[in-house]
């Protein structure tokens, strides 16, 4: 029996490298889309307490105009509860001022645009030009910039990679990478292995979601879809050891319930 368990353990180590497995640990996961999408409309203190209850320690902060006045309190509450301000959605000068004040260096996530041009080369350079002001700001703040897939031309893995390469080669932007969201990638379920391999050298974060054909529904808890178990197995076999996110993104659901469902579903898949 001992020999069998030893062999099984060695097999698991070969199939799923340890570094890859560690980034699925609860304390390493990133909570995403939990601010404007929370049905309970929590404030910074209640949100931090909720995350601590769940055992989550990293947050990617999304916001709307009404949340700007809470930016500083959000930072203070994360500090109080031992949470990492892992990423910030889009751009806002008040947030950037506070990052300097509190010496924070979160990733900055921004949708890659889908420019219209006659050639692929022209589209790549046009998309890169649009991003240049934020590329410069992120570098000044010593933050990574993640090009975020949100549909259209700018959501395609090959185009995300092409713009990353362009910015790195022509603007010395080594801090620029990709944030890839499964909930915006239903069109690449079938070729996910190839897409992941293409993006992997540039990935800053990979956000998970339950995945059914045709995005029905688009947002689904982990473990309730047809394809995410196989896709997660692909991620683990790839050796990707970077950040992994789980999300709420459901206006009609308490963010704590949504995150808990994803944690439970992920645990079952990993077992």
Image (cartoon, rainbow, N blue to C red):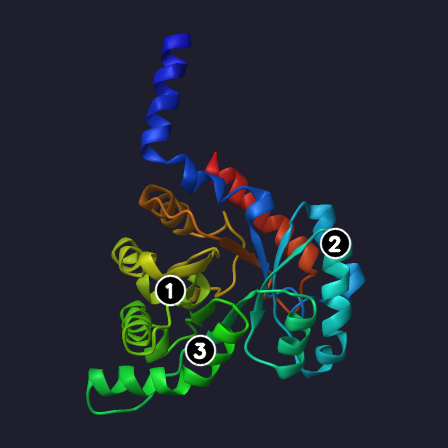
Which class describes the residues within 10 Å of circle 1: few (<14), some (14-19), or many (20+)?
A: some
**Residue 22 position within the rendered picture, expressed as x and y whole percent measured from the top left:** 48, 40
Q: Residues within 10 Å of mark 2 (few under 14, many from 20)?
A: some
Relative placement, left or right, of 185 versus 46 is left
Q: Residue 156: horizontal and vertical position, in percent?
A: 32, 71
Cα–Cα span, label 3 and label 2: 33 Å
Residues at discs 1 and 3 in contact (Cβ within 8 Å): no
Q: Position of residue 251 (x, y in %)?
A: 65, 69
Q: Quadrant of residue 147?
A: bottom left
In the image, is 30 to the left or to the right of 151? Answer: right
228 or 58: nearer the viewer:
58
Q: Tag 3: Cα neighbours inside 10 Å, few (<14), some, or many (≥20)?
A: many
How far apart in space, not on screen, are marks 1 and 2 (Cα)? 30 Å
Q: Earlier in the sequence, mark 3 or mark 2?
A: 2
Visible residue check, residue 189: no
Q: In percent of the image, x 49 and y 64: which residue is there?
A: 217
Q: Which residue is mark 2?
A: 50
Residue at mark 1:
186
Mark 3 lies on a secondary structure that is helix
- Labelled disc at residue 135: 3
Q: Position of residue 262 (x, y in %)?
A: 57, 50
Secondary structure under the numbered disc 1 in the rendered image: helix
**Residue under the point 76% across and 74% down:** 70
Which badge, 1 or 3, comes first in the chain's sequence? 3
User: In percent of the image, x 33 and y 66: which residue is there?
Assistant: 187
**Number of the front mark, 3 or 2:** 3
Q: Name the image quarter holding the N terminus.
A: top left
Task: Tell us which disc is closer to us: 1 or 3.
Answer: 3
Q: Is residue 65 left or right of residue 180?
A: right
Q: Residue at x 47, y 38 (%)?
A: 270
Q: Secondary structure at mark 2?
A: helix
């Amino acid at each position: 029996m001992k020999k069998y368990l030893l062999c099984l353990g060695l097999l698991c180590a070969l199939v799923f490298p340890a570094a890859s497995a560690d980034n699925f640990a609860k304390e390493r996961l990133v909570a995403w889309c939990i601010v404007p999408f929370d049905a309970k409309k929590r404030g910074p203190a209640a949100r931090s307490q909720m995350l601590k209850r769940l055992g989550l320690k990293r947050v990617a902060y999304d916001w709307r105009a009404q949340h700007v006045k809470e930016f500083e309190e959000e930072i203070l509450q994360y500090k109080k509860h031992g949470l990492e301000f892992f990423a910030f959605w889009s751009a806002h000068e008040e947030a950037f001022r506070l990052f300097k004040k509190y010496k924070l260096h979160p990733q900055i996530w921004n949708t890659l645009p889908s420019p219209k041009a006659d050639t692929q080369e022209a589209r790549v350079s046009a998309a890169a030009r649009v991003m240049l002001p934020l590329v410069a700001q992120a570098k000044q703040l010593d933050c990574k910039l993640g090009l975020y897939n949100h549909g259209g031309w700018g959501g395609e893995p090959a185009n995300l990679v092409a713009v990353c390469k362009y910015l790195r080669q022509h603007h010395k932007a080594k801090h620029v990478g990709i944030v890839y969201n499964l909930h915006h990638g239903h069109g690449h379920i079938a070729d996910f292995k190839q897409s992941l391999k293409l993006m992997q050298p540039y990935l800053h974060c990979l956000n998970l979601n339950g995945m059914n054909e045709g995005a029905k529904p688009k947002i689904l808890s982990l473990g309730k879809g047809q394809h995410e178990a196989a896709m997660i197995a692909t991620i683990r076999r790839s050796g990707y050891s970077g950040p992994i996110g789980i999300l709420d993104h459901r206006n009609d659901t308490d963010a704590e319930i949504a995150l808990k469902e994803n944690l439970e579903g992920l645990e079952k898949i990993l077992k």
